[in-house]
Image: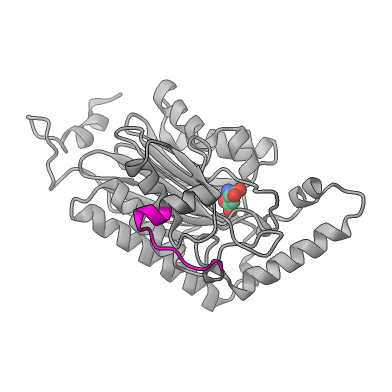
Amino acid sequence: MKLGLLLPALAAFSLTGTVNAETAPIALAIHGGAGTINPEKMSDAQRQAVQAKLDEALSAGYAVLSRDGSALDAVETAVRVLEDSPLFNAGVGAVYTWEETHELDASIMDGATLDAGAVAGVRTVKNPITLARAVMTDSPHVMLSGDGAESFAREQGVTQVPNSHFDTERRLKSLKDAKAKILAQQGVSHQAAVAALESEFKMGTVGAVALDRAGNLAAATSTGGMTAKRWGRIGDSPVIGAGTYADNDACAVSATGHGEFFIRYNVAADICARVKYQKVSLASAADTVILERLKAVGGTGGVITVDPNGRVAMPFNTEGMYRASIDADGNKVIAIWQDALTE
Ligand code: ASP
């Protein structure tokens, strides 16, 4: 590596090795899901609403980093804003299961320690990302599921709400459309019929990745999963290594897409491993996994990623991915399709 490339990173540290709060880089990226997002079917009002909410979540997380807060606090803060919005498939606005309920999954990871926490199939937790963080900090475990996770939420005093808190008319209609499509496929197994649904029924997860002034990375992901899911189906979002990964020696990743593929291809950890062991750039590692490996097998989706220098890469192999970021140079992007939005 040329010395010139090293200098900006080194300049962030004083001779004693402590971080210079004035100059150490910070960066944040967030997503609100990837999939078939047809520009013609999206009204200006819808686009502006999504854009405003992404901006709000980005600003909330970035404010944490700007006042020297931790990457963990930043990603949790940003994800909570998106969970509380009906626009995305996490928290309020989560998709419906086959039985017309909501089952939520989330995970968070600390790149400094490789500590992680996750919850799967929770029905009453208002902000699953906060419960995932409590699993990381206040339990001896990494992943809790279902009723046990809800008992833990009660013990921790994490806010609980009726399952109907997550209801939205739009997602109920999607469930009804999905069920009609699945039931129309006579002779096809439920599994195959669900797999054949267009991506609009599978996507909308939210996530965040951050670099703080102390040089620590963190990643967080939260989702309602896949419309019409059954049998306690769990996707990649709460699976450490698949939907979420952070390692200070490599990068932080939060994924969105067809979860079964992201689990099988261990997407988030694979991107970090390529950065760590192959010494390739973050952008190149993320592109190889999303645009080549996953795309070749029909695994639709994308990732947001950040490295220890505050570089951001956000590749996706779908029509669009709701995303926003501010990198170490202060470049701000809010985008849905390939090009950034201008207004
Ligand atoms: N990855 C999520 C899942 O499979 C869905 C999504 O990203 O929208 O549960």
Judging from the image, the colouring scheme is one colour
Query: Looking at the picture, how far across and down is residue 229, in whole percent?
Result: 68, 53
Q: Quadrant of the N terminus?
A: top left
Q: Is 42 placed above or below 23 here?
A: below
Q: Is 39 placed above or below 112 here?
A: below
Residue at 48 percent of width and 73 percent of height: 49
Decide if residue 172 is on the left or right side of residue 309.
right
Q: Nearer the viewer, residue 201 or 103?
A: 103
Asked where in the image residue 298 lies, by quadrant, the reply is: top right
Residue at 61 percent of width and 67 percent of height: 39
Q: Nearer the viewer, residue 115 or 311?
A: 115
Instruction: Specify whether residue 159 is painted magenta.
Output: yes
Residue at 60 percent of width and 71 percent of height: 42
Q: Is residue 325 visible?
A: no
Q: Quadrant of the C terminus?
A: bottom left
Q: Report the span colored magenta.
A: 153-163
Query: Looking at the picture, how far across and down is residue 317, in whole percent?
Result: 60, 46
Instruction: Specify whether residue 170 is painted magenta.
Output: no
Query: Looking at the picture, how far across and down is residue 290, in whole percent?
Result: 57, 39
Q: Is 78 placed above or below 49 here?
A: above
